[in-house]
Image (spheres, helix red, strand yellow):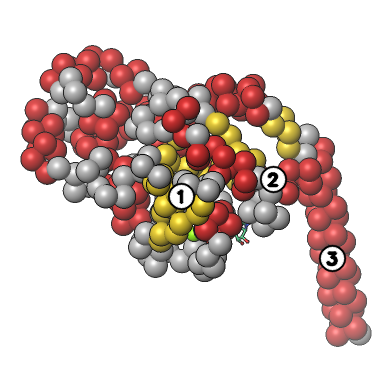
Amino acid sequence: KNSIKVALIGNPNVGKTSVFNQLTGLNQQVGNYPGITVDKKMGVTKLNETVKAHIIDLPGTYSLNASSIDENVVIELLLNKNDVDFPNVAIVVTEVENLKRNLLLFTQIKDLEIPTLLVINMIDRMKLKGIELDIPKLERELKTKIALVSSRKNIGIDYLKELILNYKNLSTEPCLHASSIDPDYFNKLRKAFPNQLLYKLWLVITQDVNFLNLERNAIQSSFTKTHAELKKLQQKETIKRYQFINDTLKIGQRIDKTKATDIQNKLDRVLTHKFFGYVIFLGILLLIFQS
Ligand code: GDP
Ligand code: MG
């Protein structure tokens, strides 16, 4: 078929809507208004003479551990292969200054074994912040392709389109094997549902989402754990993901701390000057009133 379905996913404020607008030439309102962005926004972009991409801009979400309506929208779409909007490729948008936090969601999406691309947005701020990235190394560690983008300056959008066009070359290998969270438990789960993705089952067990209800009841009743036990396993999952992300960034990211702090220092100096200014000013006032 000559149309590729693309889902744009990412934490709030990483520039998803800006990337969406650059791709589609639309002018959706930029900004994050919690509760209002629940609707999926759609747009079309031409990848070449014959192939188009249908792009969905999904509401901002921090993780797949749903706690809000916004997050449920994302999970329900990604768990339902039968959904008409189920994407051929998921694009996780991150921003260069908050990679560590943003990559948590990336590792979760990747574990759903959907072809996944990584956009690192706001690269116009890299120099200022002293951030250097080794893209080949990051691509290898994260088992993906990366587009460095500045949606503000319209950089990297053509390369991103090229990557979407070639989404079939993307690896669908997960970042974290779910079974490592609790091997015994997950092995039992795997035996009981051999045809299902382990991480997907895990999401169905832990999330309150409307996904194939019957199946969900069967999964949940035979794999019940107490709320406390589930929470503990979820925490373990998060810790494992951050360990993976830390290791990956140690290999592929360098931050020149002096650059970042130079600016901070200047700011601090200005603020302290002002502060002392106020103290002296108040002191003089006090003297005047006392005399
Ligand atoms: P969303 O919440 O992920 O949809 O993010 P938005 O597209 O609403 O953007 C959030 C903020 O980041 C806005 O103030 C944008 O102007 C800004 N922004 C988006 N892309 C870029 C970029 O490439 N560079 C810079 N410096 N800022 C950007
Ligand atoms: Mg948005």
Dot 3 amino acid type: Lys
In the rendering, which numbered label is found on residue 238? Answer: none
Residue at the (27%, 50%) spot, across then down: 84
State the CA–CA distance, disc 1 to disc 2: 26 Å
In percent of width and height, residue 79 lies at 27, 40
Dot 2 amino acid type: Ile
Mark 3 vs mark 2: which is more N-terminal? 2
Q: Tell me the quarter of the image containing the N terminus.
A: top left
Mark 1 vs mark 2: which is more N-terminal? 1
Q: Tell me the quarter of the image containing the C terminus.
A: bottom right
**Residue that carries the numbered disc 3 in the rendered image:** 274
Q: Quadrant of residue 271?
A: bottom right
Mark yes or no: residue 198 visible: yes
Mark 1 neighbour density, 10 Å: few (under 14) some (14–19) many (20 or more): some
Which numbered mark, 1 or 2, is in the foreground of this view? Answer: 1
Q: In this view, does 272 lie above or below 67?
A: below
- Compared across the picture, whether 173 is left or right of 201 comes to right
Helix, strand or loop status at disc 3: helix
In percent of width and height, residue 56 lies at 41, 54
Q: Quadrant of residue 154?
A: bottom right
- Compared across the picture, whether 243 is left or right of 283 comes to left
Mark 2 neighbour density, 10 Å: few (under 14) some (14–19) many (20 or more): many
Mark 3 neighbour density, 10 Å: few (under 14) some (14–19) many (20 or more): few
Disc 2 under 8 Å from ligand 1? The reply is yes
